[in-house]
């Protein structure tokens, strides 16, 4: 792991972007919902879908930019999505055919699992201790 | 008896069965234990009954290596020693602290926690505690604050320390009269041991040479000498006693003064709680009637073994929104806190009155949103003294309910809300206290500068290994992961990974340990398991200088426990 380096985002950002991203569910005041479940490659990218599902997308994007700069996550959208789908069971299906709650639940389960393992799934971004899956999700939003 | 060495004729030779050098926590504990026995005891105390600048100046010395407190501020030279500025935090060392851990070089005491278990309850009493118990479940039941919900197999756990009431922390406050009344124990004030003189073989202490700042010098001859001057002065006197061996007494293997350990502390991170009403009251000082508690977070033993880390304490400190903090800093809130304190003191008189505090806590939580509005809208109102008096008066008659409306009209509940950990948190900053790794290069040595008595002064070279920094960071990562997992919040590590760089606020805990470490092998320790200096048949050491490793907890109670154990040993030896 690397050190914190210069501060790139505030604790408000991590609160709104990181925590609410991860907490999901009813506790998260979802800013918007997806109006249609369009397949990827047409109108909605995975990042855009994630951004639509999650509250405080601007904050999440800032976390994502820091994650990209840290080198702890893949740098392009395809690789990020591949890494995310590989590490988050049910996310692919949730993004393609599930509800917003399904997407959040898949991320939430992955986050908890990564945190519980205390292993490579836990990284530090700008000093903040985050799950790699949520860092990838934020990075996708940043690239969307 | 308490006497003053300035009145002793020059060149006198005092005799005793036991001479204790140092009238601090260890020395007083030993004197108290031996009071009334058949053994004649002399305690040599450098200072008087109160602080004296000229005496304390004898502690001056140089700092090299990591920054540290000025040495004449890090200790106190008068009867009671550093117990006179003791923080009062007590918790026994953990069993793991005594173990040899292959990832911590130099770890492994020759004794176990079980060897001290018979002494800790008495040590707790001597330290000033009412209950010798540190069981989290026991104390969480009587606390009004929740313990953070970690599971038994999580790497982080909550633990609880007890804090001695500030009114009785200084040992002389409780033991001076007993020492004065003891006909077989004499404290010689203003008596500075300046040399431990051994026979030519250096295997037996012949006498202690003593000097006062007023100029008279005398000697003490004793069957047994106990060095109990603290972790810096114990090493200093041994090194300075170079009349027979140039490297000093007990220093055949060059270990005296090495392995200096502290409990490094600094701000290392912060938490943003998911819910600003996350309660951290359990992790602050709290009076539960029979004890004052302070909780903190630490690694579990299993995690420490798995991760191969030293122990790290994490203490939680609230960060409030600036508007709230400004309100809390206002004098009016001090008045609210005074109310809580007064109720707390009253509660010691009767349980019924004590319920007032709990009721107020519940009320303050219920009124939280109202408080927020008030705080956001301007300064808090003053809890009028007559209202406070009325509350206490009515509570004293059992009419608690009648007292409550008075407080609704008053804003004291805002202060109580903060005391209950109920005010919304903007964040929590994390202070850490680390178990320092034994390091032979972290050491006390002597300079060529001399004090007013002609003794060479100390040079302290405080150093760490790479393990301390790694332990802090990894512990915070584990805590951060647990917080994220449970949805409690998120943690930011605020220190860098460079094992050689340390935050500007790096400090110690005024705990001086390890400089005459305990080990059964004379090539690896200065004293053996009985605290006897290797190779010298009548010289013993009491105090934290004998600690082989330091744990992360405060040392005072263990110092006392070791002193009591030493007394038992000497009773067997001396009959």
Image (cartoon, helix red, strand yellow):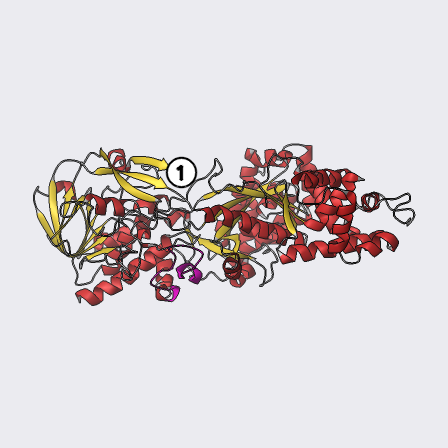
Is residue B532 at least partly visible in the picture? yes
Above or below residue B319? Residue B119 is below
Q: Nearer the viewer, residue A69 or B155?
A: A69
Residue B317, horizontal then vertical, whole percent: 55, 44
Q: Which residue: 15% across, 56% down?
A: B203
Q: How many marks?
A: 1
The reply, left or right, for residue B435 in relation to residue B352 is: left
Snapshot quadrant of residue A14: top right
The reply, left or right, for residue B550 in relation to residue B385 is: left
Residue B120, horizontal then vertical, whole percent: 37, 62
- SS assignment at label 1: loop
Q: Main secondary structure of the magenta part?
A: loop
Q: Chain of mark 1?
A: B
Residue B201, horizontal then vertical, whole percent: 12, 54
Q: Which residue: 78% across, 43% down?
A: A77
The reply, left or right, for residue A7 in relation to residue B499 is: right
Which residue is under mark 1? B66
Snapshot quadrant of residue B243: top left
Please state the extent of the stretch shown in magenta in the rendering: B94-114
Is residue B363 at least partly visible in the picture? no
Is B47 in the magenta?
no
Q: Nearer the viewer, residue B513 or B563?
A: B513
Residue B443, horizontal then vertical, whole percent: 32, 44
Above or below residue B281? Residue B571 is below
The reply, left or right, for residue B471 in relation to residue B486 is: left
In the picture, the quarter occupied by the C terminus of chain B is bottom left
Q: Nearer the viewer, residue B51 or B298?
A: B298
Count residues near mark 1 (Cα–Cα under 10 Å), then give few for <14, some for 14-19, many for 20+: some
């Amino acid at each position: 792991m690397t050190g914190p380096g210069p501060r790139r985002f505030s604790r408000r950002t991590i609160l709104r972007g990181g925590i609410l991203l991860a907490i999901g569910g009813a506790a998260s005041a979802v800013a918007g919902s997806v109006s249609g479940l369009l397949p990827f490659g047409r109108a909605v990218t995975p990042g855009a879908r994630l951004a639509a599902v999650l509250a405080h997308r601007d904050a999440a994007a800032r976390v994502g930019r820091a994650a990209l700069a840290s080198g702890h996550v893949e740098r392009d959208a395809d690789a990020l999505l591949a890494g995310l789908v590989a590490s988050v069971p049910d996310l692919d299906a949730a993004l393609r055919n599930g509800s917003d709650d399904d997407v959040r639940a898949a991320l939430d389960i992955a986050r908890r699992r990564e945190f519980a393992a205390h292993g490579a799934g836990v990284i530090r971004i700008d000093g903040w201790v985050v799950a790699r899956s949520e860092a990838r999700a934020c990075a996708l939003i940043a690239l969307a | 008896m308490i006497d003053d060495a300035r009145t002793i004729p020059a060149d006198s030779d005092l005799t005793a069965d036991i001479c204790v050098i140092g009238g601090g926590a260890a020395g007083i504990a030993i004197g108290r234990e031996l009071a009334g026995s058949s053994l004649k005891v002399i305690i040599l105390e450098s200072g008087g009954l109160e602080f004296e600048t000229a005496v304390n100046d004898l502690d001056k010395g140089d700092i090299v290596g990591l920054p540290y407190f000025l040495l004449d501020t890090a200790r106190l030279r008068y009867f009671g020693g550093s117990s006179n500025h003791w923080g009062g935090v007590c918790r026994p060392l953990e069993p793991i602290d005594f173990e040899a851990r292959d990832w911590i070089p130099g770890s492994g005491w020759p004794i176990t926690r079980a060897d001290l278990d018979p002494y800790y309850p008495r040590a707790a009493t001597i330290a000033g505690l009412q209950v010798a118990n540190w069981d989290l479940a026991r104390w969480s039941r009587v606390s009004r604050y929740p313990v953070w919900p970690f599971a038994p197999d999580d790497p982080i756990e909550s633990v609880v320390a007890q804090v001695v009431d500030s009114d009785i922390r200084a040992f002389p406050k409780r033991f001076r009269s007993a020492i004065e009344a003891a006909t077989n124990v004499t404290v010689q004030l203003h008596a500075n041991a300046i040399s431990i003189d051994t026979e030519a073989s250096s295997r037996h202490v012949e006498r202690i040479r003593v000097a006062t700042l007023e100029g008279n010098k005398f000697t003490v001859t004793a069957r047994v000498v106990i060095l109990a001057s603290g972790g810096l002065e114990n090493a200093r006197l041994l090194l300075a006693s170079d009349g027979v061996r140039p490297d000093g007494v007990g220093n055949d293997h060059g270990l005296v003064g090495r392995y200096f350990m502290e409990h490094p502390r600094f701000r290392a991170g912060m938490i943003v709680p998911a819910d600003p009403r996350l309660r951290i009251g359990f992790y602050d000082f709290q009076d539960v009637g029979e004890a004052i508690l302070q909780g903190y977070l630490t690694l579990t033993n299993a995690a420490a073994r798995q991760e191969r880390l030293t122990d790290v304490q994490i203490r939680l400190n609230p960060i409030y929104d600036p508007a709230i903090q400004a309100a809390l800093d206002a004098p009016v809130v001090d008045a609210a806190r005074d109310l809580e304190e007064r109720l707390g003191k009253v509660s010691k008189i009767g349980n019924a009155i004590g319920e007032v505090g709990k009721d107020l806590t519940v009320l303050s939580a219920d009124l939280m949103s109202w408080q927020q509005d008030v705080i956001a809208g301007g300064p808090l109102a003053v809890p009028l003294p007559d209202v406070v008096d009325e509350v206490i008066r009515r509570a004293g008659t059992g009419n608690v309910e009648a007292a409550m409306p008075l407080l609704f009209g008053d804003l004291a509940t805002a202060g109580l809300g903060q005391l209950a950990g109920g005010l919304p948190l903007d964040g929590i900053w994390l202070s850490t206290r680390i178990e320092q790794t034994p390091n032979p290069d972290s050491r006390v040595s002597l300079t060529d500068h001399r004090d007013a008595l002609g003794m060479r002064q100390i040079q302290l070279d405080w150093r760490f290994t790479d393990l301390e920094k790694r332990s802090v960071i990894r512990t915070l990562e584990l805590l951060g992961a647990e917080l994220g997992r449970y949805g409690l919040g998120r943690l930011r590590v605020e220190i860098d990974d460079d094992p050689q760089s340390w935050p500007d606020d790096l400090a110690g805990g005024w705990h001086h340990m390890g400089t005459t470490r305990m080990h059964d092998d004379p090539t690896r320790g200065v004293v053996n398991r009985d605290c006897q200096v290797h190779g010298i048949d009548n010289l013993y050491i009491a105090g934290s200088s004998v600690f082989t490793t330091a744990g992360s907890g405060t040392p005072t109670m263990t110092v006392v426990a070791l002193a009591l154990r030493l007394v038992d040993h000497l009773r067997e030896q001396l009959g």
